[in-house]
Each structure stands twice: as structure tokens, then as C-alpha cells.
Image: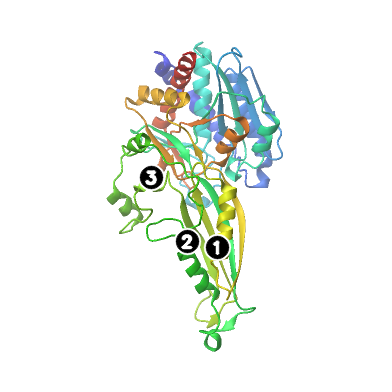
Amino acid sequence: MDNLKTYIEENKERFLDELFELIRIPSISSKPEHKDDMYRCAELWKKMLIDGGADKAVVMETEGNPVVFGEKILDPSLPTVLVYAHYDVQPAEPLELWTTPPFEPEIRDGKIFARGADDDKGQGFMHTKAFEYLVKTNQLECNVKFLIEGEEEVGSPSLPKFCEDNKEMLKSDVILVSDTGMIAPDVPTITTGLRGLCYWEVEVTGPNRDLHSGLFGGAVANPINVLAKMITQMVDENGHITVPGFYDDVIEVSDEERALMAKAPYSEEEYKKALDVEELAGEKGFSTNERTGIRPSFDVCGIWGGYQGDGAKTVLPSKAYAKISSRLVPDQNHEKIAELFCKHFESIAPKSVKVKVEHLHGGQAYGCPIDLTAYKAAEKALETVYGKRPVPVRSGGSIPIISDFEKILGVKSVLMGFGLESNAIHSPNENYPLEQFFNGINSIPYFYKNYAEMMKK
């Protein structure tokens, strides 16, 4: 692949023009008024796949927004890589905080500024150009399929059924994804885990109406007081979640992977300074990066009840509420954890109140073994481009469809992303450094080369 850098240099202006055409379509999946834009964006992706060398590309209906599927099959006996990306984006509001219009991409300070520049149009587009290079230079050595959806930003509600209905069409040996990030521009990174999620809303009811806090205070249980006390019982002094059975299925990460994770650059002082906190908290026996990547967590995301207006109102409220989330790790089953929490939370409630727990939603965690052939291929690809071995990281966030892929299609995903924390995805002035964009296009062809060679052995 001696001519890869030359190919990128000779075509970089065209690459950017094509990406900007994609970005200019406001494909906001959460807003029904953009339904037509979803189809326009899907059709443009279809055209780009065909232009890039796919044998076929089609826009397919789902129960929600359309999916784009494309493929190039060299030989059914060769290994097949399924590339996953999404063409939908987050809303751009608040618009007044953007320096330039969110759907008019502009290059400033070596970065592309626009909604979707990184998440995920920029990162997904890298794959079409890497694929184009391999096809046009006759260096593709395996089959490639593309699955590009339009509902990731709203939780991919239609994609699991689409996968169930099209298992044979989507059959592959591995799924390749660039919808994650790197620790820093000079620290190549492969995401080896995504945490799962459970999310509940709890309601605690005391008296049948709000009461005068002077006449009834001290005689009737205050639901807010009770709820606060119940919540404090959920985590002990060691940062350990107290729900019985909560840790039964937690997979312990190997010493080898923990050692590799520890090589990631990290300054606790800078971390605290950035958050303006004097001290960090969490489960004892684990580093900060391990707490957010390989260990489960428990957090109250919102709590309310009683009088919240200006001034004073001496009221003992009838009800109190909280929204609670727990991030999960492999192999915790989110449905099992949801049930364990509900039973435990109800069991610790005093008889002075009534408790209602509603499980709102959840998703499975995902883990990619570092001895997986595709992981090794990605590792070698990034080492070729960056000159150093990539660091495996466990992300604290979630991409629920990745675990669905494994469950439905029976294959693992490799998360080889190039985004940076400073790219402000989901926020005003989202951006994507040109260096990351072109490094992505430079790295992906080496993944295919390495994977095809390793699968022959």
C-alpha cells in the first residue's frame, strides 16, 4: 500500500466536497419534520457506495427510517467484513451557540465544524473512501458489506428487527465500526468495551396529600427524607453497590488488559481540575479509568418533590421522585439487573411509605476480546500508521445496537474510532480534525489487509 498516502493527497479535496454534501443534509432522526431529509441522506449514501465500488447498494425500508445496505462480494469463500455506521445526527440546538451554521460545514483551525462532522458522518464516510481506494487499486482481499442506519441517535429502535429479518443478507465474520474515539491525537486507541444500561423512575408516597410541616412534621414520614435515605443505602462506604446478586455475572478483566489500559495517559490532578472537584470517588481497588470502563456504576440522575418555587412554603410533601441509572458491564443482563433492583428497593422501604419502581429502558454491555483476530488486525493497522501500539480502552458509554448485533447476528464488533473528546459531539460547534479524518482513511485499508492475511492462517 505504498501509494495509499499519495491517493489520499491527490483526492483529499474531492473527499471533503463529498463529505460536505452529506453533512449539508439535516438528517435529524428525533424530529419528524426531517423525514424527507432522512431519505435524501440515505439515497446519497447509496450513490456514494456505488461510486466507491460496491457491486450493489440499496435503500431498504424499516419500521422507522430507512437503512442503506451495500456490498462487494469477491468470493463467498473469503472472509466478510460488515461495516456499520449511522447517517442520522443530533439536533443542533441551541443554534445561537454555533459560530457558523451547523449544516454549513466550514474548515477552521484545521478542523471541520458542522453537525455530524464526527458523529457519525465524518467517521462513517472514512470507510467509503478506504473501501474506494482498495477497490480502485485492486487491493481488496475480502468481502465487504455496509449497513448504514438512520436511527442510532434515538436508540436504533428499528434495527434489531431489521437484523432479525435479514440475517442471511448481513452474514459476516466481523463488524467494523468507527463511532468511538481516541484518548488523544497521538494515542491510537481501540474501544474494547461498552457499558450496558438500566434506567428506572421511582415514586415514594407518604400521606395522601401535602401536609402542613408544622402540624404534621415529626409525626408523619416525609417521602423526600425517606427516598434520600433509601438511595444512600444503595452504595456502601467502599463504593460497592448493595443490591443482592448485582455482581454475580460481572466478568473480571484480565491482568494483561488492565496493564494495557493503565498505559493510557492520565493525570488525576488535571482530571480533578477540569471538573473543579477536590477529590474523586468510586469503588475501592480500581483506578478512575477502570471505574468508568470495566466496573458497573449507580447514579441518581434526577430527584424532586415538594415545593420548588421562589420563597418558602412549609409543606410536608405527599410524594417524592427520582430517576436512577446503572451502567453495566459484561456479562450483566440488563433485564435481570432491572428486576433485582426493583425487588431490593421495594424491600428496604419502611412501612410508612409506599414505593413504586418503573423500569424505563436498558441495554446490554459489550466486550471485545483483545485476542480476537479482528482486534489484532485493527491493532496492527493503527500501529502501522501511528508508529505505536494502540491502547485498549473500555468506554463508560453505551451503543446498545452493538450488543444486539452479537446476539442476533452472532458476530463480534471491532470499535476502531478516531474521534476526540474535544470534538464536541452532540454539542454546538461539533468538529472533526482533518488530521483524524485523513488518518482514519489511511488506517482502515491496513485493517482489511491484516484481517485477510490473518484469516488465511
Q: Are marks 2 and 1 in contact (CB under 8 Å)?
A: yes
Residue for point 55% across, 43% down = 364
Secondary structure of the residue carrying tag 2 is loop
x and y, in percent, of residue 353 in the image: 59, 73
Q: Which residue lies furthest to the bottom in this view?
A: 215
Identify the residue position indicated by label 3 in the image: 290
Is residue 277 depicted above or below 408 in this figure? below
Residue 371 seen: yes
Residue for point 32% across, 53% down = 272
Mark with earlier residue (2, 1) = 2
Q: Which amino acid does label 2 sit on?
A: Met
Give the color scheme: rainbow, by chain, secondary structure or one colour: rainbow
Residue 257 lies in quadrant: top left
CA separation, marks 2 and 1? 8 Å
Q: What residue type is labelled 1?
A: Phe
Q: Residues within 10 Å of mark 2 (few under 14, many from 20)?
A: some
Secondary structure of the residue carrying tag 1 is helix
CA separation, marks 1 and 3? 27 Å
Residue for point 61% across, 16% down = 73
Per the rendering, the mark at residue 345 is 1
Q: What residue type is labelled 3?
A: Glu
Please name which of the two marks, 1 or 3, marks the residue nearer to the observer: 1
Per the rendering, the mark at residue 234 is 2
Secondary structure of the residue carrying tag 3 is helix
x and y, in percent, of residue 39 in the image: 67, 35
x and y, in percent, of residue 156 in the image: 62, 41
Mark with earlier residue (1, 3) = 3
